[in-house]
Image: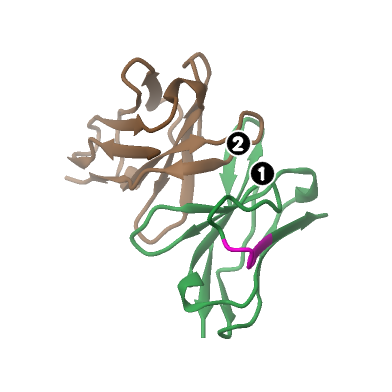
Amino acid sequence: SYELTQPLSVSVALGQTARITCGGNNIGSKNVHWYQQKPGQAPVLVIYRDNNRPSGIPERFSGSNSGNTATLTISRAQAGDEADYYCQVWDSSTVVFGGGTKLTVL
Amino acid sequence: EVQLVESGGGLVQPGGSLRLSCAASGFTFSSYWMHWVRQAPGKGLVWVSRINSDGSSTAYGDSVKGRFTISRDNAKNTLYLQMNSLRAEDTAVYYCARDSTPGYYYMDVWGKGTTVTVSS
């Protein structure tokens, strides 16, 4: 089965740029989606199809996908961005989530 | 307002059964594929199951295959998850989610979740 690998944690200074990676075999050939989940809340879609933002998601959130790595980039990080982030793909008729990355804003 | 509201969670003994429901409103439910996703305490998201718009096609994660059944009633705008032979490792918050666009398989609307605890 297809596996997605994310770092357990990423830290970023307030106002700086955070990058969260999602690794998978030839992931560049797949559509990658990203979700944000704050404690006690349901996940929220923040990026779909590699680099598209749903309405209401700040422009500070962007995505890229190439080769074996997809990346979620959060510019000008704010305290409110502190959350768990999950990447997701569709493979062999199933949904696959990465293990999740805890973003800490210092 | 587009909304998904799960219900039916609770405490159940190992080997028992439970049926979860997800009531949809604010959109044309019958036009969308739907998913169940779960999250064990302190753990990540795990996909459980999906169903297509008319209920004719379903798929399951390996950990629940043969024990769980997804279904829907488009007349009642409701999604279901029948869970049988429950195990301690099925303990989790269960979310229903709407699949945004056929062919891309991402979830743009999520419910708040319902908690299932499997314990004796």
Residue B96 pos. (x, y %): 40, 38
User: The numbered mark 1 sits on a residue in which chain?
Assistant: A
Q: Nearer the viewer, mark 1 or mark 2?
A: 2
**Residue at horizontal 50 percent and vertical 13 percent from the top:** B56
Residue under label 2: B105
Q: Which chain is brown?
A: B
Q: Where A104 falls versus A86 (above or below)? A: below
The label on residue A37 is none
For residue A5, above or below residue B26: below
Queried whether the magenta region covers residue A21, the answer comes back as: no
**Residue wearing tag 1:** A2
Q: Amino acid at mark 2?
A: Tyr
Q: What is the x, y in percent for residue B107?
A: 52, 41
Prevailing secondary structure of the magenta residues: loop
The quadrant in which the C terminus of chain B is found is top left
Q: Are marks 1 and 2 in contact (CB under 8 Å)?
A: no
Query: Which residue is found at the position 58% from the left and 41% from the top?
Result: B106
Q: Chain of mark 2?
A: B
Figure colour of chain A: green
Amino acid type, callout 1: Tyr
Q: Give the left or right position of residue B83, taking residue B62 as reference.
A: left
Which x, y percent locates residue B15?
25, 33
Q: Determine whether, in the image, residue B119 is placed left or right of residue B24.
A: left
Query: Which residue shows up at 31% across the image and 19% down it?
Result: B76
Q: Are marks 1 and 2 on the same chain?
A: no
Q: Quadrant of residue A7?
A: bottom right
User: SS class of the residue under badge 2?
Assistant: loop
Q: Residue at x 64, y 63 (%)?
A: A59
> Over which residues does the magenta segment extend?
A58-62
- Percent of width and height locating residue A19: 67, 71
- Label 1, label 2: how far apart the Cα atoms are: 15 Å
